[in-house]
Image (spheres, helix red, strand yellow):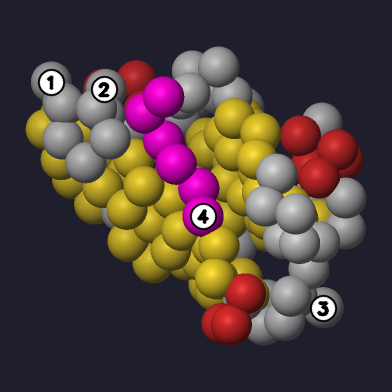
Amino acid sequence: QVQLVESGGGLVQAGGSLSLSCAASYSIYAMGWFRQAPGKERDFVVAIDYESEKTTYADSVKGRFTISRNKANNAVYLQMNALRPEDTAVYYCVASHQIARMVKGDIDYWGKGTQVTVSS
């Protein structure tokens, strides 16, 4: 059982930046982030293959969000720039044994989530 612990998030004005971190209890093939806005379903944001560092981004965040990982401490980081009010959501760190499955929403492990609020 992989445990995922998120940190970061908070309140920022539109156009600002925030960063999120996620520490895993041990390394797993793919990690990433989903988000859920109020009244909406959880949506894929970004994924990274832990070994190859191949990344996949949702179109809505391309060019604004950047994911990276640190193998030494089993952690991934999400740098979010040029934030928009529509980015407001609870962000969940996720992990799966295959990145392709993660992108399709087939998630093996979920974190508890952290709130990101972008004011206009």
**If the image is split into quadrants, where does the C terminus sit?**
top left
Point out the frontmost of discs 1 and 4: 4
Identify residue type, mark 3: Gln
Q: Position of residue 117 (x, y in %)?
A: 26, 38
Indicate the quadrant where residue 87 lies.
top left
Residue 62 falls within the magenta-colored stretch: no
Label annotation for residue 1: 3
Q: Residue at x 72, y 60 (%)?
A: 50
Indicate the quadrant where residue 80 lies.
top left
Q: CA distance from mark 4 to mark 2?
A: 24 Å
Instruction: Decide: few, some or many residues near mark 3? Use Cα within 10 Å; few <14, some 14-19, many ≥20.
Output: few
Residue pointed to by mark 4: 68
Sequence-wise first label, 4 or 2: 4
**SS class, disc 4:** strand
Q: CA distance from mark 2 to mark 1?
A: 6 Å
Q: Residue at x 82, y 31 (%)?
A: 104
Residue 66 falls within the magenta-colored stretch: yes
Residue pointed to by mark 2: 85
What is the magenta range? 63-68
Position of residue 15 in the picture relative to residue 67 (left or right): left
Q: CA distance from mark 1 to mark 4?
A: 28 Å
Identify residue type, mark 1: Ser
Identify residue type, mark 4: Ser
- Assess whether mark 1 and mark 2 are in contact (beta carbons under 8 angstroms): yes
**SS class, disc 2:** helix
Residue pointed to by mark 1: 120
Instruction: Decide: few, some or many residues near mark 4? Use Cα within 10 Å; few <14, some 14-19, many ≥20.
Output: many
Q: Position of residue 74 (x, y in %)?
A: 62, 76
- Assess whether mark 3 and mark 2 are in contact (beta carbons under 8 angstroms): no
Sequence-wise first label, 1 or 3: 3
